[in-house]
Image (cartoon, rainbow, N blue to C red):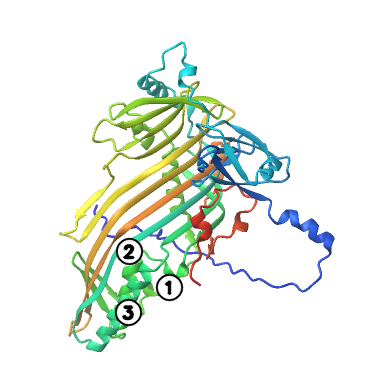
Amino acid sequence: MIPISLSVTLINLSRFIDINHHHQKMRYNIPLLLLFIALPVLSQNITVKLIDKNTKKPIPYANIKTGAYSGVISNDEGFFSIYAEDDTKTITISCMGYESKTLRVADIKSLNYSIELKEAINQLSEVFISTKAPNADSIIAKVISKLADNYNYDLNAYSIFKRTTNHVDFKKLEFEIDKASHVKKKELEKANFSLNALVKQIKNSNMVQFSDFKGKLYSLNTDSIKIEVEKATELLDTKNDFSIENIQEKSQKIILSYLDTTKTYKLKTGLFKIEDSLALNDEEFKDENKNEHKLSYLNDDTKGLLKRSQFYENSFLNKILNTDWYDYTLETIGYNNEELTYIINFTPRKGKAKYTGKLYIADDTYAVTRIDYNYYKNRHGEKVNLKFILGVKYISNVSEGTVIFQKDSSSTYHPKYIKCTTGSYFYVSRPLKFIENSKNRSKVSFDFKIEGDNRNKQELLITAHNKLTFLDFQAERQKEKIPITILTKYEKSVWDSEAVLEPSLEMKAFESEE
């Protein structure tokens, strides 16, 4: 199916309830004692940065354990936040290639919230000083034989935090009315002026959107999940929210506004004709009540992301373990979360294989504890090039990610953190024609051309895990819609005391136009 209407934008979701924050200046004298009592509870979250002791570079994706099976992950820039009830609370930090570290909150404060990790010595020669290092293919064979023992996807309950970041970069925008019968030249000039103003607005917009939600995920199996949302926010510039569909709609509204508002029009493109009549007072051209979000969309996105961490027939990870498709080489051995770990590089052997990356495999269980992947050289995903026939071109040219697993008390591995970044190039050229529904059949010809790149990053942090019964899963009722808080700038207080992903510096600096 040709993706004529490309969803390359800042997720085409419904918008939600806008929470207004009213700030009032209190003129009352607050007793000093009450002030001291209130201070500790204002914010008990602390933000910390992890850096390499030698290079001073940030350390991403380190595991920060706040309990036996709870904790967070450092973000792409090495930052993490934890809820610090008191200075005696301890955390343990572990990351492949570095020595683990256990600290109290008091220690973190004394280090000025910056923790240096010491690089671990390459232990490949030490571990196998008297024996030959294992063959990479034999390790992969054992991984495959142990999949059923190491992973269980049935009847699980997870506490989750999910963040989606969308960017769009429009490289070319061209809107122009070519011909307009029965439209005065002055009106035509005004319409083209408005279209040029729309182009400038789009190019000057901050085309980024951040969506967060925290809640529970109930998994029956790999194909069926339910989601319970406890809190959801969206950070975006509501005045400059553009998608290809949204841009086309806005340009159509401009054209209709300069036509006879008492008439209706049919829309014809170079591809097809829309039989439904369009008019300036059509419901589809009115602003929607953007205060709800269908949970089914969120469910599908989250399920798709979770599938990236699962091993089953024809799954993404199972294809990486296909020895007919990929070659494997042992890079080194080290300790990760106190487990002796093999690091194995994989590269395509056949044309069907598209990815390269690293597999981290525990020596005692032969479980994959982490995978990093990206497209190999010039390989890509879906590609459609009908630029000169239908005015459409699309190339999926970015696919990269990281999956990190954590072992539970029953020695079963569950995803701890999943990141998947996808991107594409898109080109859409649509000649549009508005035809008046009358005997005169007045027409307006309009050229619509868009070209650019989009990037979508999804992250899923799992902060706790419990087993479910089938009756528990049946009893859970997923709501149809949820409210969401629309933010115009990042507000740390929204997620205080919550186990979440620390926002990026870009997200912290984001501020929409008022």
Please name the residue that numbered disc 2 is placed on: 244
Task: Tell me if 181 is positioned left or right of 492 in this view.
Answer: left
Q: Look at the numbered discs 2 and 3 and tell me whether their residues touch, using CB distance below 8 Å.
A: no
* Cα gap from disc 2 to disc 1, whole angstroms: 17 Å
Q: The residue under label 3 is which amino acid type?
A: Ser
Q: In which quarter of the image is residue 347?
A: top left
Label at residue 431:
none
Q: Which residue is drawn at 53% across and 58% down?
A: 508
Nearest the camera: 213 or 155?
Answer: 213
Q: Residue at x 31, y 52 (%)?
A: 424
Q: Is residue 259 visible?
A: no
Task: State whether residue 215 is above or below residue 187.
Answer: above
Please name the residue that numbered disc 1 is placed on: 287
Task: Tell me if 56 is positioned left or right of 396 in this view.
Answer: right
Query: Whole-percent x and y of residue 478?
Result: 52, 51
Q: Look at the numbered discs 2 and 1 and tell me whether their residues touch, using CB distance below 8 Å.
A: no
Q: How crowded is mark 3: few (under 14 residues within 10 Å), some or many (20 or more)?
A: some
Q: How crowded is mark 2: few (under 14 residues within 10 Å), some or many (20 or more)?
A: some
Q: Which residue is drawn at 48% across and 67% down?
A: 290
